[in-house]
Each structure stands twice: as C-alpha cells, then as structure tokens.
Image: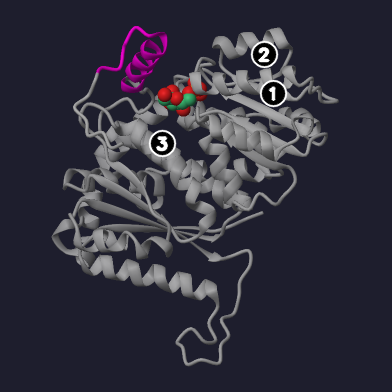
Amino acid sequence: MKGIYKFNFDNVLKDKIGETGISVDEIDELRDFTNLAKANVTKKYEKGDLGFIEVLNEDLEIYEEVKELSKEFDYIIIIGIGGSILGSKAIHQGIYGSSNTYHPKVFYLDNSDPEKIYETLKAVKLEKTLIFVISKSGNTVETLANYFVIKKHMDKNNITPAKPNFVAITGGGLLQKIADKEGYMCYKVPENVGGRFSVLSAVGLAPLACLNVDIHNLVKGAKKMNDICQTDNIFRNPALLNSLIHYKMDNTGKKISLMMPYIGRLHQFGMWYRQLWAESLGKDGNGQTPVIALGATDQHSQLQLYMDGPEDKIMTFLKVNTFKQDYSIETDYDSDLKGHKLSELINSEQLGTEKSITEKGIPNVKITLSELNEYTLGMLTYAYELQTAYSGELFCINAFNQPAVEHAKKLSHAVLKGSIKEKSYNEIKIE
Ligand SMILES: O=P(O)(O)OC[C@H]1O[C@](O)(CO)[C@@H](O)[C@@H]1O
C-alpha cells in the first residue's frame, strides 16, 4: 500500500500573506536553531527517552494473538481516556469512517458518563464482546470506573463468554494488579511512551489489529515519515518545518492552531491532535490552543470568525485527492453544480476557503494525501508526533509531561472522598 504526502507552506510566506508571514531566507537563517532542536530530539531518543520512536521497530507479530481472539466476538468495547483511546478512535475512523457498519462493531467508553455505559450495554451482547481496558498509569478513575461497572454487570447477570473477553493494556497501577489477578491477556505500555504519543504502541495497535486496520502499513507509513525526517534540510523535513512555522506564528500572536480536515474520516484525527498539541505545549504560560473544524461543514458556522475575527490563528488544511466513493451531481435545474462530482465540490470549497483566508493575510499550511489509507495515515500521525517533540525543544519546554492535570485529578479525588465540599454559589435559580 502506498500514498503520497504533500506539505504545502506557500501561504505562510511573506510574499503570499505579507508582513505576518515569514520568508524562505528567515527559515534558512534559523537553520542552527532548528537543527539544535532536531539534535536534542535525537539525543533524547538515543538516551532511550522517546518510546514513540522506538515502537516503530516493534515486532508486530505480538498482536496476532489478540487478533485471533477477536475473531470469536461480534463487538469490541474500548475503555480508556485521553491518549489511551483517542489514537484508536482517530485511526479507526480514518480508515473506516464513523458508520460502525463493519464487523466487529466498536464502542468507546471514554468518559464517566453513566448514560454512555447504558447506551453501550443496550447496543452490544456482552457475551460476544471483546473489551479492551487501556490505561498507561493503570489508575485513571474514569477508566477503572467504567471497567468496574461493566465487570459487575457481567457478574450480576452471569454473562460468561465462551472465551476470556477482557484485554488489559497498561504500564502498571491498579489495572495491572487486576489483570494479574483475573488472568487477563495483557499488553505492556512502555514507561518511555507518553500517553498522547502511544497510538503506534500496543495502546493503539492491539485494538486496531482487531478492528481490521492494517497495522503493518500504518507503521510502514510512520517509518517512511521517520526516514524522511532524518534530513537536516528543513525544506525537506515536513515535521521540522511545520514545527518552526507554528513556533514563529505563535511568537507573532497566532495563539490558535486551527486544523480543518476536508474529509469526515479525519475529524477524530483532529481530536487526537488536540490532546497532543495542547497537553504537550500548554505549559509555563506557553501554548497554542488547538481547534478542530470540519470542512466544508464549518465554513457555515465558523468561517465568519476565522475571516473577520481576531487575527490569532494559523490554519492547517488536511485534504485528500481521492475519496473511497464519489457521486456525480446530476440535475435538470440550472446550477453550477451540474456535471461535477461531490469530490470536486468539497475540494473546490477547500481551495476557495484557503484563497480567501490567504487574501486576508491569515497564515495557513496544507497537507494533501493522495488517498487516506493506513500508509498515509501512519505518515500523518507520526509527522505530528515528531513535530510536537521538535516544538517542545523550540519552546524550551518538556513536551512529555502534564503536571497541571495531576493537580486537578487530586482535587477530584478529594471531592469524591468528601474532603472538599461544594460551597454554596452566588447563583440564579429558576424554578
Ligand atoms: O493512560 P492513562 O494513564 O489512563 O491516562 C489517560 C490520560 O490522562 C492523562 O494522563 C491526563 O490526565 C493523559 O496524559 C493521558 O493520555
């Protein structure tokens, strides 16, 4: 399986968008700065700190066992949150869309919302459901709570599948203890693989292998991108170049990184990017807020703001040249649409939007995939992981921890235990 990945950066250059842009010379003059960032990432990798790069060389045969097991089941439930589930959702939707009409049907429990469990239990037959419980720390309350509720429901209703139907993917904590005691099939999350960087580790590959995603081509695409990004020539290194572009734009007040795919199958990819970019770079007062919009749909809800609101955005268009299906627009009425295909319409809307925001001087880059398959999606996913690692170096921050989140978790635990009470608020009460 092959595919072409094009990274177009015309529309961040001064000669296209004026003074808010950067020039090729400026990029070239920053060669020492960007190569130092790249060298630091290489150093971290050589020190064994960057598991998201190491996993590219993992033996994928280890997923044959769970893939075989999954053939006994008609449904898959993935229990996780953040990087433990967003990657699988992004890749699965990227390949199969969101129709869930394929076998096995997949359901995601990624919140502590009781109604979501209720709806999921109504949709599946648990005796025919393979359940992944995924948590790198093994202690995330939402994930454990969902597991406990499902497990209790099975025990209470004497639901005993023909084969063991729980698979744990974890780095330790309580989930590891549960997996050991219950004898669950278990895949390890290596310590040096950060949660939001874990989609190409067992966290993503084990469930995706069971969802008929070609994980070999997914990793092949990622490895291709890794090979491409070995070069110090920034004009041939899309991850490094996009990292510098976003760094420079951040410094000129573009505090929002807006990603706008023009294909529905990349919307969840945007949600994965949202965590990767926000949780990696949102530290010490730094950070570009990632926002996801879907083209062409959100031209009709957000574009007015993007065009005429604050000039605080750098936009990234994602598009494909070939869709899996296409339709001709045929009508007897007098319309410009006549004789065109829907793919031509959506891509003309992308180009029209791109040209209009470029005329407004709003910086934007475009990533074009010849088609959206496991190979090109592997390239895209890995490009953003590497770009984020480079960006941590450019911003001089640790892109691999999330200290601020830990505090909120402690307070939530304290509320749950009753040691923090909800105080009365000034409020408007409407009976
Ligand atoms: O995989 P775990 O340990 O359950 O964590 C889930 C998510 O929660 C976070 O730790 C933030 O709370 C993310 O970094 C992580 O992806």
Q: Which residue lies under the disc numbered 3? A: 276
Q: Nearer the viewer, residue 185 or 226?
A: 185
Nearer the N terminus, badge 1 or badge 3? 1
Residue 107 screen position, x and y as percent: 63, 38
Residue 262 vertical position relative to residue 120 in the rendered view, above or below: below
Which residue appears at 65% of the width and 23% of the height? 150
Reply above or below: 230 against 186. below
Residue 222 appears in the rendering: no
Q: Amino acid at mark 1?
A: Val
- Asked if residue 168 lies in the magenta stretch, the reply is no
Which residue in the protein does label 2 denote?
179
Residue 418 painted magenta: yes
The three-letter code of the residue at mark 3 reads: Leu
Q: How far is mark 2 from mark 1, CA to CA?
A: 8 Å
Question: In the rendered view, would you say 182 is above or below 222?
Answer: above
Contact? badges 2 and 1 (CB < 8 Å): no
Residues 301 and 63: in front is 301
Q: Residue at x 25, y 50 (%)?
A: 28
The kind of secondary structure element at disc 3 is helix
- Looking at mark 3, is its residue's CB closer than 8 Å to ligand 1? no
For numbered disc 1, what is the local secondary structure? strand
Circle 2 packing at 10 Å, graded few (<14), some (14-19), many (20+), is some
